[in-house]
Every structure is written in C-alpha cells, then in structure tokens.
C-alpha cells in the first residue's frame, strides 16, 4: 500500500484588495488538485495576506521554513513560482535557500521548474523575468491612474474598510458579537460560510480575513 506523502501549501496575494477575491481559492484548488493526483497530503497551509513578493522575509514564509526544519515535512507546493515572488532575484534566492536545505519545491502549474536541472533553471528564470516585467508594467499603470485621478479630483482614496458598504455593517456586528462571546476566527469564518454570507468580492470567508476585519486592519 502506497504511503501518502506530506507537504505544505503556500498561498500569497500581494494586494490588500485581493484578500477577499478569487486568488486564495484559485491557488488552493490548484495545489489540492496536483497534490491529490500525485499522492500528496497538505498537512498545513501558510498564507500571506497582502504581502509583497519583493520581500525575502515574510511572516508565513519564515514560519514555513522553521516548520520544514523541525517537523519532518520536506516539500512545499505553490500554485506557481511567482507566488513566491515576481521579483526574479528574490525568487531565485528563495529557491536556492530551499535547494541548500534539500527541501522540495513544487509548482502545481509548472511541475518541472522547481529543480536544479540547468535547462529547467534557464526556463524558470525566463518565466521569472516575464513575471517581473508584467508586475513592473502594472505598477506603472496603477501609478499613472492614481496620478490622473488625483489631478482630476484632488484626491485618490484607498479601499474603504469593511462595514462601509451597504449591508456590511450588520455582518461586521455579527462577527464582533461572535468574537466577544469567545468565538475564534475559524469558527466565525465557518459560521459565515454556512449561512451563505459572501465577502465583499463574493468569495468565501477565511479565518485570517475575519481577524483582519474584526481587528480593524484594512
């Protein structure tokens, strides 16, 4: 009987506005699909909410490295390598760190790129450079859009906190009430999902999203 292999799953979105969107469900589904097809079981998820991929030190990424060094799991699965970083230098530094410690890094959508074969390294770095270019061009477009809006209106507001839109205050009060009587973030998220209550973007609730909203972190 074949033994199921163990792995960690790593999820990341870089923008605060993406936290409640399709990014996390999409990444998780891709990882779980690859893991199931290849005999892996995800024992723990490490999630970065609104964290830039230009940072080599991140809370969940650092915690995952500590866990890899301490509990026997040696494999990490990501949806795609740009979830590690869209900065080519940072991507390669992180991958080198994993190779040095003899950990296995698997991309669910690029399963042949997470190794040290010279041809695969070459292809990985080409893709990494393309992702970096895409991100740089997007940053320029967003900056130009903000400047145009500020020039036209005199201001450029950020994303309004949860509770500002119609119908959100009641949900927020419900979350705060559950938390006040001892409900943890997982329980509150599960309750919202079971009641069919959607996030602002129409997605499902995650414990970290509930925590961020209840504690007032935009």
Image (tube, rainbow, N blue to C red):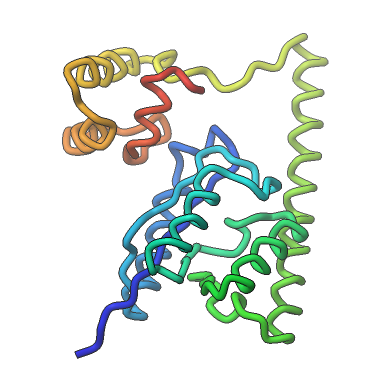
The quadrant in which residue 45 appears is bottom left
Residue 99 location, x and y as percent?
62, 73
Up-down: is 197 above or below 111?
above
Image quadrant containing the N terminus: bottom left
Residue 166 location, x and y as percent?
37, 15
Along the horizontal axis of the image, is 202 left or right of 185? Answer: right
Residue in the image at 68% along x and 46% along y: 55
Residue in the image at 81% along x and 31% along y: 144
- Numbered disc total: 0
The quadrant in which residue 75 appears is bottom left
Residue 9 location, x and y as percent?
42, 60
Residue in the image at 75% along x and 56% along y: 132
Residue 111 location, x and y as percent?
53, 77
Using the image as rendered, state which of residue 23 and residue 51 is in the foreground: 51
Using the image as rendered, state which of residue 23 and residue 91 is in the foreground: 91
Residue in the image at 73% along x and 85% along y: 118
Using the image as rendered, state which of residue 127 and residue 196 is in the foreground: 127
User: What is the residue that sits farthest to the bottom in this orientation?
Assistant: 1
């Amino acid at each position: 009987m074949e033994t199921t292999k163990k792995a960690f799953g790593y999820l990341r979105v870089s923008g605060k506005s993406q936290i409640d969107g399709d990014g996390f469900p999409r990444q998780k589904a891709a990882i779980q699909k690859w893991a199931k097809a290849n005999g892996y079981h995800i024992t723990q998820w490490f999630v970065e909410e609104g964290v830039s991929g230009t940072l080599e030190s991140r809370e969940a990424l650092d915690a995952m490295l500590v866990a890899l060094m301490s509990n026997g799991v040696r494999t990490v699965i990501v949806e795609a390598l740009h979830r590690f970083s869209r900065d080519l230098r940072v991507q390669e530094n992180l991958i080198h760190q994993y190779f040095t410690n003899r950990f296995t890094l698997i991309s669910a959508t690029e399963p042949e790129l997470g190794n040290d074969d010279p041809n695969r390294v070459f292809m990985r770095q080409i893709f990494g450079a393309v992702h970096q270019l895409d991100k740089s061009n997007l940053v320029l477009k967003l900056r130009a859009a903000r400047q145009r809006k500020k020039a036209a209106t005199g201001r450029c507001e950020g994303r309004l906190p949860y509770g500002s839109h119609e119908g959100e205050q009641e949900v927020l009060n419900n979350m705060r009430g559950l938390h006040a009587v001892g409900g943890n973030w997982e329980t509150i998220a599960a309750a919202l999902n079971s009641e069919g209550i959607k996030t602002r973007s129409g997605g499902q609730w995650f414990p970290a999203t509930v925590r961020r909203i209840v504690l007032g972190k935009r």
